[in-house]
Amino acid sequence: MSKSKEIFSEAIKYIPGGVNSPVRAFGSINREPIFIKKAKGSKIYDVDGNEYIDLICSWGPMILGHNDERIKEAVFKACEDGLSFGAATEIEVEMAKLICEIVPCVDMVRMVNSGTEAVMSAIRVARGFTKKDKIIKFTGCYHGHSDGLLVKAGSGVMTAGVPDSAGVPKGCTKDTLSATYNDLSSVKELFKENEGQIAAIIIEPVAANMGVVLPEKSFLEGLRKICDENDALLIFDEVITGFRLGVAGASQYFGIKPDLVTYGKIIGAGMPVGAYGGRKEIMEMVSPVGAVYQAGTLSGNPVAMAAGITQLKILKESPDIYTELNKAGDTLYSEIKKIIERKGLGYTVNNIGSLASIFFTGEEVKDYSSAKKADTQKFAKYADSMYKNGIYVAPSQFEAMFLSASHTDDDLEKILEAVEKSLV
């Protein structure tokens, strides 16, 4: 028995499902989780000593690769002064200033501890600012696991086949309305049916939790216009896209200015952190300045701030990183498309720069309903084969692939060799 299997047999005794997040479970692909011991650059290593080229990158934030020496040095240095103070520090001010300098749509920012917390807080601020209760989200988009947003969510909820969640009272979701991604008419209809009651639209500008689904032309522009016409706020959930599509994220990439934006672990170089920010007049609704209460003992943790600042400064000062990263992504995913075409498989590949998904369906994937047509059993066989060929992919059809700046041309060749063997 492998060490991973031994650990999993113990894990299921003490942890629900043996994992601390559903997206780490391998049940949907009919195998036990791989337990990771260490990582460096583009590689991760399991407890059995196996090496994998990593296509998860801790679900996105490892843009520079794993265990970057510059980030590690900054973390060690911060640890020498203490791990947590629960008090104001200069470094969190430095982080806030840096984000505001990098992202044009952010005038002020508040640190939190996760993407879930960032989104939950941004929604509360939007409601406080507009004095309205209802929000619109999109079916298949995942915005964390707070009660009010576990409605027709994506990611792990899709993989498990559970449309919502037990334990969420109906009252918590009565003001959450669901529209269809890439369908402006569905949004307009909700505004018509709930005139004067909608505080905000929240969206992943590039959906990445029902697999990667790109916004169609004029979709995001249309949402901006609808919000302006109805005195509602537009919130970009950039937990995935922030600082990945480019240094200023999707808002700059698509040329759309949201009112609020949320971030997750990407601003901590993978450490547990998050943030939300936006226009000054909106953010000044937040306590202690305004009437919207939000707090967190560990918010702006100095160790996480040190890691995040180091990575963000590197990305800000070296824009060529994105040029090369997006070029590598376009090259890799175009070659995968060629393999699929050559094999006559008819699968769909959606990608934008370094972010991508292979959908095991021949239909164009542009929303939740088309994503759900993917053959998850074919994906399971593909994923298992990829692991056996030394490539670490997400154990779900509905998650994304991520590249990092540390992936080499040799890595890309090995990925393509594995894909050639694994796609059937």
Image: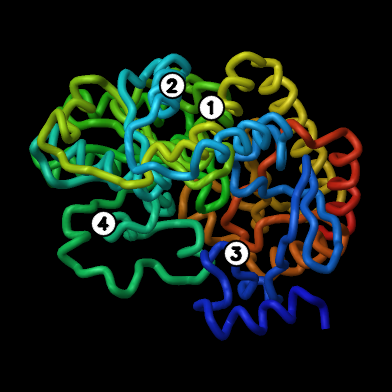
Depth-wise, is mark 3 or mark 2 nearer the camera?
Answer: 2
Near-viewer residue (361 or 46): 46
Separation of residues labelled 3 and 2 (CA atoms): 33 Å
> Which residue is identified by label 3?
24
> Which residue is identified by label 4?
148
Marker count (numbered): 4
Mark 1 falls on what kind of element?
A: helix
Position in image of residue 160 (x %, y %)? 50, 71
**Discs 4, 3 touching: Cβ within 8 Å:** no
> Which residue is identified by label 2?
94
Q: Give the crowd class for mark 2: few <14, some 14-19, many >=20 residues within 10 Å.
A: few
Placement of 280 over or under 377, stated as above or below:
above
Mark 3 falls on what kind of element?
A: helix
**Discs 3, 1 touching: Cβ within 8 Å:** no
Near-viewer residue (396 or 53): 53
Placement of 391 over or under 245, stated as above or below:
below
First along the sequence among labels 2 and 1: 2
| Left or right, residue 372 beside residue 170 | right
The amino acid on which the numbered mark 4 sits, given as a three-letter code, is Gly
**Discs 2, 1 touching: Cβ within 8 Å:** yes
